[in-house]
Image (cartoon, helix red, strand yellow):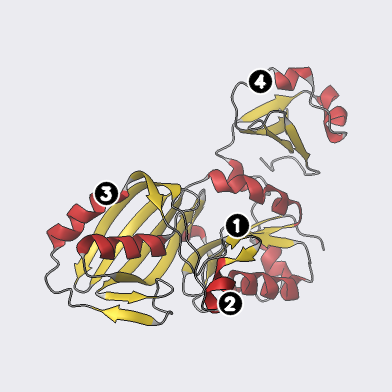
Amino acid sequence: MLLDGWLNIDKPPGMTSYGVIARLKRLTGQRHIGHAGTLDPLATGILPVAFGQAARTIEFLHQVSKTYRAVIELGVETDTLDAEGNILFRRDASSVSHEMVNSALESFTGTIQQVPPMFSALKRNGVPLYEIARRGETVELKPRTVTVYNIQLLAFDPPFVTLEVDCGSGTYIRSIARDLGQVLGVGACLKSLRRTRYGVFDIKGSIELASLETAGMVAARLLPPGYPLAHCPAVYAGFESTERITHGVIPAEVQSQITEARTYRLCSQDGALLAIIDATGADLRLKVFNLTAGDT
């Protein structure tokens, strides 16, 4: 049984994102499975998993926002910026107040510059930074532009700070923990992290990995391949254009509906997802699907 669709998995602690995929491959016997938005082993929460043709939509999910609940420990700094790393120093954080934390957080919203962690999957000359860090080497990391839509202080129980963070692609919560500690002058590291939303995937509708015992149980919980593309506006093609689209041609009637440099869902008149059109480059790029009606 070939599966096409998405699973909204609640990743357990201590497991890598690839470990989730490996388990689902063994369970279903299907090789073509991928995921969006890697989570560190320490982290829990939403890991969108794509089966079959749904995996072809992963590249378009980087445009969506995510929500995290983070617990940060003040007064401790580690080499990995989280609780799994080697402790570099400890400082007394007892002087930090609720008001000081709230004031410091004001500088973390909007479009900001953020230096990524040295222990990350980002690459330098083709080599992941975490491999360089494990060799005891360091490289100069340049700040990257990221977007933080909102940070809310949920609790302050010294030395722990609990935040809810709404952010865009490429934002490292570990870096927010580090930078918050630096602003407060006491250092900090990420104690725990839970992703509660990834685009349209919400923790309330998530599935515990351990609850899936058979391929049939996986199939019963699949969401349509086009489910996470709600952020992409839909354009429509007439029945007579369908065959041309399957051969990689974008009909004039469709091109006339494309008015912005963004990604579009190309659907038939009955709602079936035919393709994705990427209009963000110099030329239109068409990615064709073979799906049934309703997969929009």
Q: Position of residue 84 (x, y in %)?
A: 43, 79
4 and 2 marks in contact (CB < 8 Å): no
Front residue of 228/287: it is 287
The numbered dot on residue 210 is 2
- Image depth: mark 1 or mark 3 in front: 3
Q: State which quadrant residue 91 falls in.
A: bottom left
Residue carrying label 1? 36
Q: Position of residue 94 (x, y in %)?
A: 13, 74
Q: Secondary structure at mark 2?
A: helix
The three-letter code of the residue at mark 2 reads Ala
Residue plotted at (52% across, 48% down): 200
N-terminal of the pair, mark 1 or mark 3, is: 1
N-terminal of the pair, mark 4 or mark 1, is: 1
Residue carrying label 4? 257
Question: Where is the N terminus found, in terms of image quarters?
Answer: bottom right
Residue carrying label 3? 107
Rendered view: 259 above or below 143: above
N-terminal of the pair, mark 4 or mark 3, is: 3
